[in-house]
Each structure stands twice: as structure tokens, then as C-alpha cells.
Image (cartoon, rainbow, N blue to C red):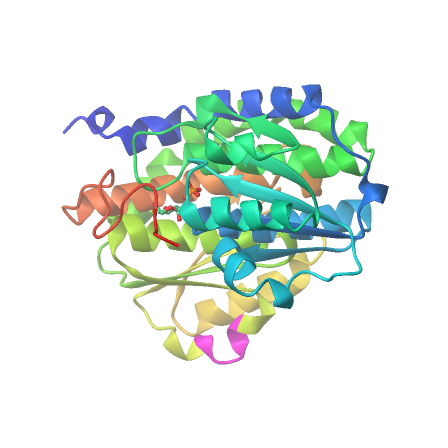
Amino acid sequence: MSLEKFATYREIKNQSAAWAQALDVVRAAALPLPTDYEQVIFTGCGSTHYLSLSAAALYQELTGRAARAVPAGELFLNPQTVLRDDLRHLLVAISRSGTTTETVRAVEKFKSEKRGDVIVISNHDESLSRLADCSLLIPKGQEESVAQTRSFASMVVAASAFSARMAGDEDLVNAMIKLPGIGDRLIGRYETRAKELGENLEMDRFYFLGSGTRHGLACEVNLKMKEMTLTHSEAFHFLEFRHGPMSMVNDRTVIVGLLSDANRVHEAQVLAEMKNLGGSVVALGESGTEIVFDSGIPEPVRGVLYLPVLQLMAFYRSVAKGLNPDRPKNLSAVVKLDL
Ligand code: F1P
């Protein structure tokens, strides 16, 4: 069977051009000053909420200024749990489509209440970008598929470069130029392994472990397993996994670790313990892991490299289960509500 007939496959395989465009767009953008804001909020829904989790962690890590992520539905329905009347906010709204109702409504409300400025990261020039004070648009990330892969990765690159620029760290931004080439190399080198992992239908549950800026990425690849493969899957911070979830580990469990450099010893220890409990373990990281980036890119801005191999794993599992990865059950590409 030709896999090229699946839009999801094509979008995963040729995503690096969208990464390059994301970087160009952020480098050319006129960004505000981080000191103009006392609180930064990242928001989105589904995949783009998970992207917000990762981006908020990175923004705070790089700029040293307070940032948090909330689902757009929460920002719209429960703003008092997020915003403070005495603070000037920067809202970074992330959406592939630019038309998800919760995200658009949350931004409209934020603006009408004059809470601060709005940055939009999107693949489409739609309602959301028209509300923005600064819009970071990456059309090369657009997709036919329902589940986000290329689009998500392109917006991860944009959010990472945005945080690095807001931190005034041009060296970090320049280091990102190598990302597209390394992404292509990873896909070439590890597609066979992704296929093998995905096609092993003996495995019936997947756990994705990621801490710090990687937690949102772990949540996203977990969502790919659900959307595309209808498999039981969850994401946890590394050390959290011992606090209950590990009761689920058996010989049909795959534990995927998004390893950091900084906390490598503690994270690898969790994976070793899960292997002892009978689980199958797959680790991704810069070096010394089964899936090796060997990128030389500083840790804060290489997060996107965790994605393509795991997206391919979900794709191959979907096909092996006789599902259509392009059309996940019960889902549409955009959620439109009458709010
Ligand atoms: C967000 C989103 C997707 C999800 C689903 C519904 O869309 O929740 O993450 O996969 O297809 O929409 P967007 O606001 O990023 O366009």
C-alpha cells in the first residue's frame, strides 16, 4: 500500500519546510518588549493548548518573567482564575485554523476588557490573526488532516523562537537555523523504528513522559495516539509516574521518555524502573538514547525534535489497526461552538 495517499504521512514527512518558514517569520517580526507585561498567558485548545503548556514553560525559563498556559475555554469561561485586574498582560493565542470558537471568543473578550496586547501564532490568516497586535503566520504548516502534525511542529518552532527573541537571546534564535536539516535526518534515520513500534499491536497502552518544557510535547504525542490510533495513552511528568500511574505497567506497555540533558539522571532512573516492571521503554534525547538527535542545538530551543518520530509511530499504528489516520473518529479539524 502506498502511504503517500495519506495526507498525514505527507505532512509528517515534509514538515521541515514549515519549520524553516516559522523561524523566518519570527525573525522578521516586530515584537513588543517583555518588560511591558507583568503576566504572560499562552492559550489554545487541544493540541494548541498543549503547545501553550510547553511555550509558557519555555517563555518563563528564557525571559525570567511569569508565564502560564490555560485552555482558551477556561480563559473565556473562568477569566477570574487566570487574569488579575492589577496586571498588564500579554496574551499569546495559538491556533492552527485561527477559527476555533473558544480561542477567538477568549481573545475578543480579553481585548474588549483592555487586558493587554495579543500575539497570534497560526497557520491561517483568519479571525484570530485579525484580532492580533502582532501575528506570526506560518502558511506552510497548513494541513488537510484533522490531527495536527506539521502545523503543530511549525508553531512549536515559532513559539520557541518567539521566546528566545523576547529574552533578547539572538544566539539561541540563530542556533535554530539547523533544526529543519536535523528534523529531516531524524525522519530518515528512525522511520523504520517508528514503524516497528507503531505496528506492534501486542502493545495496548502508551505513556509519554516529559518534564519542564517537554511536558506539553509529551501531552501532544499522547493526543496523537488517541486521535489517530484509538489507543489508551496518557502523558505525565517523569517523577509523577511513580505516584500511581506505574500500577498500569505490564508487558503490553510502552513508556516513551522525552529525556532532557539537565535532569537526565532522574528521568533515566524512572525509565529503568519501568523496564524492570516489564514495560518496553523508548527514550529520545540529544545523546545516549535509543533515538538520538545529535543536533548540537541548545536544549531550550530543540523541543520540536521530539515530535516527528513519535508522530510517525502514531501514523503507523493507525494504519496497522485498519484506521484512517487522516480522519480520526468523532473529530473535525475545528471545533465551532455557539457561545
Ligand atoms: C484545535 C483542535 C485540535 C484538535 C481537533 C480540534 O484547533 O482542538 O487540536 O486536533 O482537531 O481542534 P486549532 O484552534 O489549533 O485550529
Q: Nearer the viewer, residue 63 or 281?
A: 63
Indicate which quadrant contains ligand 1: top left
Compared to residue 287, the image places residue 260 above or below, namely below
Q: Is residue 121 visible to the viewer in this orientation of the structure?
A: yes
Quadrant for the C terminus, please: bottom left
Image coords of residue 196 (percent x, y)? 30, 44
Residue 48 falls left or right of residue 279: right
Question: Residue reaching furthest front?
Answer: 112
Residue at horizontal 77 percent and vertical 33 percent from the top: 32
The residue shown at (69%, 34%) is 162
Q: Is 22 above or below relative to 162?
A: above
In the displayed structure, would residue 332 be above or below residue 179? below
Identify the residue at horizontal 45%, vertical 51% (top origin). Answer: 102
Give the residues in magenta: 241-245
Q: Is residue 287 visible?
A: no
Q: Position of residue 24 (x, y in %)?
A: 63, 19
Task: Tell me if residue 245 comes above or below residue 43 in the rendering.
Answer: below
Name the magenta segment's main secondary structure.
Answer: helix
| Residue 61 coordinates in the image, percent (x, y) | 75, 50
